């Protein structure tokens, strides 16, 4: 806790927000790995989120923002400073007949179900994608020929000065697994989508069809962070990994899934170092045999000073 300013700690305690000191991040990430964060805070509302994020920056305290931890690999050495979770920012409201807004921490599956309840079509592709609404916007999550950029109307965020602003779809600089937030110090507060009227039964049928395909093709019975690598231009990561004969390759308790080569899984009490080392080995083998460079889709955070091969 030496990285936490006493004033910040006092403010966290007085805020009434939930917090965990020396928080074991393996309990808050889908990989089920990672060391302790100095302190993990769950601001109870947007005002507390903005206040705490601004305070940390003003005091020079390291700060990291997480959603539900489904796309993260946290170092076994943990995370220094304050980790802020958006999980309490989960309000959802209808704006008009075709649009609605949700807090960044709302699970994406609940976002999709809200669209279903209103017979709105356009979010079916996202049903089954793990993660939060904010995380999905941050990385322009997508699957089955759909992406968040296709439905997002605008996002609200807080910047490094604690100012709240809004960006429209055109300003969000969406591309494959990227948005303007990917390379900035702005943190998403809420996401607004505009959809189209549809048939409720057809929407539900499509959601169930895509979920069935996920269950059939993906190793959902093991902890993972979803697709480990981005799709390289001109090919697919899972195809390249499979063609290189890397299914089943393992380091410690981490393994390339036999079911879907694009997934690295925590097969047997893996450490984050196991997973990271396997990512490096897969990249090296694929590059050596095909010339393609695989870039991680997952976000790697925490104290990795012990690694001299850290991916940038």
Image (cartoon, helix red, strand yellow):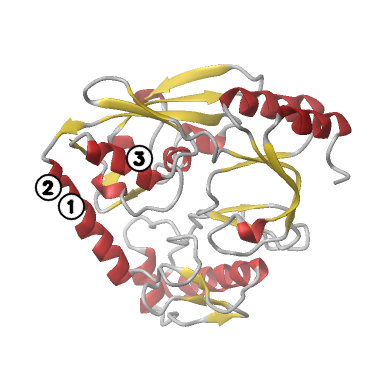
> Is 255 rendered above or below residue 183?
below
Dot 2: element:
helix
List x then y, in percent, for residue 103.
46, 32
> Which residue is found at the position 64% from the left and 66% from the top?
272
Q: Residues within 10 Å of mark 3 (few under 14, many from 20)?
A: many
Q: Is residue 10 left or right of residue 94?
A: right
Secondary structure state at the residue bearing disc 3 = helix
Quarter where residue 254 is shown: bottom right
Indicate the position of residue 94 as horizontal and vertical percent values. Answer: 31, 24
The crowding category of the residue bearing disc 1, from other C-alpha atoms within 10 Å (few below 14, some 14 to 19, many at least 20), is some
Q: Which residue has dot 3 on it?
A: 111
Q: Position of residue 284 (x, y in %)?
A: 54, 71
- Numbered circle sitting on residue 202: 2
Q: Quadrant of residue 11?
A: top right
* Secondary element at image label 1: helix
Q: Label 1 near label 2: C-beta < 8 Å?
A: yes
Mark found first going from the N terminus, 1 or 3? 3
Q: Residue at x 52, y 33 (%)?
A: 89
Indicate which disc residue 34 carries. none
């Amino acid at each position: 806790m030496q990285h936490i300013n006493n004033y910040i700690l006092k403010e966290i305690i007085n805020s009434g927000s939930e917090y965990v000191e020396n928080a074991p991040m393996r309990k808050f990430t889908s990989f089920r790995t990672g060391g302790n964060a100095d302190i993990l805070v769950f601001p109870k509302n947007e005002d507390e989120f903005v206040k705490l994020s601004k305070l940390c920056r003003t005091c020079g305290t390291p700060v990291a923002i997480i959603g539900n931890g489904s796309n993260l690999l946290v170092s076994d050495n943990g995370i220094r400073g304050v980790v802020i979770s958006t999980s309490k920012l989960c309000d959802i409201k209808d704006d008009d007949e075709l649009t609605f807004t949700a807090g960044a921490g709302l699970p994406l599956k609940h976002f999709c179900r809200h669209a279903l309840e209103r017979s709105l079509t356009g979010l079916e592709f996202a049903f089954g994608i793990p993660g939060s609404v904010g995380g999905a916007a941050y990385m322009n999550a997508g699957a089955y020929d759909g992406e968040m950029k296709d439905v997002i109307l605008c996002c609200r965020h807080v910047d490094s000065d604690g100012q709240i602003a809004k960006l429209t779809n055109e300003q969000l600089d969406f591309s494959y697994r990227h948005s303007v937030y990917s390379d900035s110090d702005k943190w998403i507060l809420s996401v607004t989508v505009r959809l189209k009227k549809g048939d409720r039964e057809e929407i539900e049928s499509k959601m169930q069809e895509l979920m069935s395909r996920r269950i059939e093709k993906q190793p959902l019975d093991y902890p993972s962070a979803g697709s480990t690598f981005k799709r390289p231009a001109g090919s697919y990561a899972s195809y390249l990994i499979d063609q290189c004969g890397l299914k089943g390759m393992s380091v410690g308790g981490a393994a390339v899934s036999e079911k879907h080569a694009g997934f690295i899984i925590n097969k047997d009490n893996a450490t984050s170092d196991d997973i990271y080392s396997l990512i490096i080995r897969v990249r090296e083998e694929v590059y050596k045999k095909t010339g393609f460079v695989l870039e991680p889709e997952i976000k790697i955070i925490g104290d990795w000073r012990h690694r001299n091969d850290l991916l940038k």
